[in-house]
Amino acid sequence: MEQNILVDVLTSLQRLFVGYILAAVVGIFIGFLIGINRIVYQIFKRILQLGRSIIPIALLPIALIVFKQIEPATFFVVFISAFWAIVIDTAKGIRQFRQQGNNFRLAINHIFQALRIGIWVAWFTVITIEMLIGGRGLGVVIWSAYNSRNPDDIIQAIIYVSIIGFILDQLLDMTGYFLSQIVLEGQKKDL
């Protein structure tokens, strides 16, 4: 497992970032548009929960039929997995931002919470898809180790998945904290 693990890690991260970054950009934009208007927010907050309730991995067969290739289908499912959480929590943050006197710190906290939830769901989705489709990636490593009855490799791959997920989450958490502190300092200077 050691010789190819870097390739598998990079393959999984590529799948994650292609879908997730697009979901973050589109999700924050749409969440902002929904959150700035109280009526639009009230209409869409229920509709968006419906989309969020769809299990992302269940969309894989449909995505494979539509895209006819594994990678675009994977990117689409990863996008969808992160998109709903990002839109919903961004809209909620913008709504509270408006209700509480344009509190930028509150909006930033909600947006980064949305990004953190989105990246976790997207990361789990990538690993699950890889277990199903094969090829390369950490999900494939876990499934291949299972088929080979090699618990040491399963545990090692799970540790890689967990550490990467933790690092991604902490990077977003620290970035959100840093930005909220900058905003807080800016608000203090304005007073």
Image: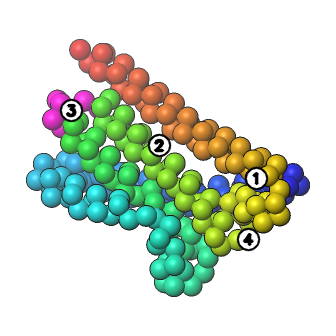
Q: Name the residue located 18 percent from the left edge and 30 percent from the top edge.
A: 100
- Residue 130 against residue 163 in the figure, above or below: below
Give yes or no for contact between labels 1 and 3 (Cβ–Cβ under 8 Å). no
Q: Name the residue located 45 percent from the left edge and 50 percent from the top edge.
A: 118
Numbered badge on residue 116: 2
Q: Residues within 10 Å of mark 3 (few under 14, many from 20)?
A: few
Q: Earlier in the sequence, mark 4 or mark 3?
A: 3
User: In the image, which residues are magenta?
Assistant: 98-104
Measured in 3D between alpha carbons, the distance from the residue under mark 2 to the one under mark 4, in whole angstroms, is: 27 Å
User: Magenta span has 89?
Assistant: no
Q: Name the residue located 55 percent from the left edge and 34 percent from the top edge.
A: 170
Measured in 3D between alpha carbons, the distance from the residue under mark 3 to the one under mark 2, in whole angstroms, is: 23 Å
Numbered badge on residue 102: 3
Give the structural element (helix, strand or loop) at label 1: helix
Q: Quadrant of residue 81?
A: bottom left
Q: Could one spot residue 51 in this view of the protein?
A: yes
Numbered badge on residue 135: 4
Q: Position of residue 86 (x, y in %)?
A: 38, 51
| Residue type at numbered disc 1 | Ile
Give yes or no for contact between labels 1 and 4 (Cβ–Cβ under 8 Å). no
Numbered badge on residue 154: 1
